[in-house]
Image: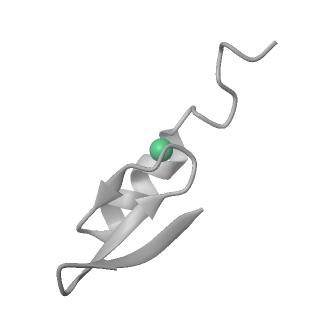
Amino acid sequence: MVATTERDGSTWYECEECGMLFDDQGDARQHEETCDSEEPSYIQ
Ligand SMILES: [Zn+2]
C-alpha cells in the first residue's frame, strides 16, 4: 500500500513494503505493483 507522508513541506508517497519514497503517486503505485519485498527471500 502506498502511504502519503509530508516532508520538508512536500508530499511524498511511500511504499509501505520497503519504505521507498517517491515524489509522484503514479510512480509509487507502479513500484508497489512490482515491489517484491512482500515476500522477502530470506524468510523461510
Ligand atoms: Zn517497495
Please indicate whether residue 8 sits to the left or right of residue 38 in the image.
left
Q: Which residue lies furthest to the bottom in this view?
A: 9
Question: Residue 29 falls in which quadrant of the image?
Answer: bottom left
Residue 41 on image: x %, y %:
65, 15
Residue 2: image x %, image y %?
51, 65
Q: How many labels does the image show?
A: 0
**Horizontal and vertical percent position of residue 12:** 30, 72
Does residue 42 lie above or below 22 as drawn? above
In this rendering, position of residue 6 left or right of residue 37: left
Residue for point 28% across, 60% down: 22
Quarter of the image for the C terminus: give it.
Answer: top right
Q: Which residue is rendered at x = 19% and y = 87% of the image?
A: 9
Tell me what residue is drawn at x 41 percent, y 53 percent: 30
What residue occupies the far right of the structure in this picture?
Answer: 44
Q: Where is residue 27 in the image (x, y as percent from the top left)?
A: 31, 59
Q: How is the image coloured?
A: one colour
Q: In this view, does 25 lie above or below 8?
A: above
Residue found at the far front of this picture: 8
Q: In this view, does 44 lie to the left or right of 28?
A: right
**Quarter of the figure with the N terminus:** bottom right
Residue drawn at point x = 50 percent, y = 50 percent: 32
With respect to residue 17, does 43 lie above or below?
above
